[in-house]
Image (cartoon, rainbow, N blue to C red):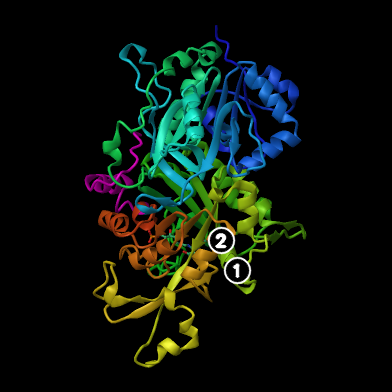
Amino acid sequence: KDHKPKLYILDYGAGNVRSLANSIKKLGYEFEWIQDESDFDKAEKLIFPGVGSFEQAMNSLRSSGRYEQLQRYIKSGKPYFGICIGMQVLFESSEESKSTKGLGVVPFPIKKFSTEDLKGKKTVPHMGWNSTWRSFILEKEEEEEKLILDEDYYFVHSYAALLSENSDTDTDTKKELMQDYAYTLSRYGSETFISSIKKDNIFACQFHPEKSGPAGLDLLKKWLISSTDELSKSNFISINNGKKWQIENPNLKKRNNGNGLTNRIIACLDVRSNDKGDLVVTKGDQYDVRDSNSKEKEVRNLGKPVELAKRYYLEGADEIAFLNITSFRSSALFDQPMLDVIKKSAETVFVPLTIGGGIKDTIDPDGTFRSALEVAGLYFRSGADKISIGSEAVLSVEELLKNNNIPNGKSPIETISKGYGNQAVVVSIDPKRVYINTKENPNWKEDLKIKKHLDCLIYGDNSISKTSNEEKGKIWWYQCTISGGRDSRDLDVIQLSKGVEKLGAGEILLNSVDRDGSKKGFDLDLINLVKKNVNIPVVSSSGAGSTEDFLQVFTKTKTEAALAAGIFHRKEVEIDQVKLTLENNNLPVRRCGL
Ligand code: 1PR
């Protein structure tokens, strides 16, 4: 009676599977990793948390012989749970790699989200929290226990099982076929896609339950406690058959503006060792983390990284970012204290974790070379969902421009996004304003040093930021820096943003050296400038001082997310207050119910 079905996880070595393992442990279940063919026979339930790219997943299944084994397992009728790419591999093909065939269990293609939408430009990847709804209207008597609730789940993908809106006979026929599989739908902009499928023994979702906070854990738990019999029931076909698609979100009210995604709120922890050698969360003022009021000019200590991360998870942060701010001091890869921080945090935090600082090619003290890809891989296996590259990204774009804008395939952004998908690669930008002294330099427009950056100019008279009064009459551009703002480069923020997008970055974390720790509000002019020039999500950072500042950044710019550090650490503003303010102004946010 107490028999718990033997659970296995199929991992092919790409990306963060630790979070899934942690969530299963947290729910009180045990599992084994699939090691060889016989494990497929022993498995009574199987989870495939696919990460990375479709091509890489299929190739690795093929080359390891897992392709046939997995196909046999699915045909055997034992329960299968696919996550993200683990859902997509079930489909017949993906636009991501036209020459690669999927398992073909679901007779439908995976397509890329469009970057143009009814309302104009659309950001791809679709990254963040979005809602789902049941794909068919059920009769009252058919009401079933819902596996997926009317809550927000965390998505991160550029390709999806899109239901085409226009009448394309081939797709329409397939759409009919999809009736047997579609369990929930979701919408990104004007595109509707299948966000989960359920048929016979198969259940799979496009979003990441292990990263979706309490709602995701609830879904995993329901699947884990269901008996194999229940999960293998084929009566689902009769439920869907002949029903009409429920193409509109019945809870549309919640998403009355925007593209479906909630406005993400991110807590950021700048981490370094203090003078006593303890690893602490610190906070700079324009990147200076030493407290000038203290006698010894100590490194500000605002708490312990793992504890603070847990606190922010419980308070409803949609993501947590750790930045190792002294990473330019090299240390042996396996000696990185941040690895331990991320491992421990991933045990209690079930929303996406980003780790930045020191993601670059390194040489250990014993002379061993470690590529950036290897460094990133270690972080992913420790529980990070995304890595963030700072200084090295600037150097890579300098190289790209020298090479006539032709990528050489070698930069960390390229190698890591190729290996783990571009959604896993964030670039953290540390721009600084350079004011132009128009009085001393009346012919400044002809000045060669400035001429290169004319695209990047802001006239203070047009500034939309809260401090626009102080900025009247001033003119400036945004220069990029490396090594935590210490070293300025002759690259502007537009060149850098466009360059990193070209190299394959999936998101930009946009800081501001001028606004950092100032509580003067986000630099809205800077954010708009970058947003206008890229098609990937932008996280706005630096300067948050009040809930009003978050309202401003989400209404006056098209940013996808806002990040803050100081005000959260000092409990001057709570995440919940921020979300309440946004909600009261009709901006969708995720409510986590913790
Ligand atoms: O260059 O790849 O090794 O990465 C180093 C990373 O560390 C970069 O992402 C860089 O931004 C960050 N960093 C380096 N030095 C500092 C510093 O503060 N001395 N921190 C630093 C960057 C900015 C944000 C901060 C926001 C919000 N700090 O992390 O959290 O500005 O703060 P606020 O809400 O209090 O205004 P690499």
Look at the image and tell me whether residue 182 can be seen: yes
Q: Residue furthest top?
A: 1
Residue 17 visible in the displayed image: no
The image quarter in which residue 139 lies:
top left
Q: Position of residue 321 (x, y in %)?
A: 47, 51
Q: Which mark is residue 405?
A: 1
Contact between marks 1 and 2 (CB within 8 A): the answer is yes
Q: Is residue 519 above or below residue 135?
A: below
Q: Is mark 2 within 8 Å of ligand 1?
A: no
The Cα atoms of the two marked residues, 1 and 2, are separated by 9 Å
x and y percent of residue 359 in the render? 61, 57
What's the residue at 28%, 47% (across, down)? 587
Q: Which stretch did the figure color magenta?
A: 569-594
Residue 441 position in % (x across, y down): 39, 92
The amino acid pointed to by label 1 is: Asn
Between residue 235 and residue 348, name the one nearer to us.
235
Q: Earlier in the sequence, mark 1 or mark 2?
A: 1
* Left or right position of 263 against 109: left
Kindly identify which residue carries mark 2: 502
The residue depicted at 54 percent of the width and 69 percent of the height is 482
Which quadrant, please, contains the C terminus? top left
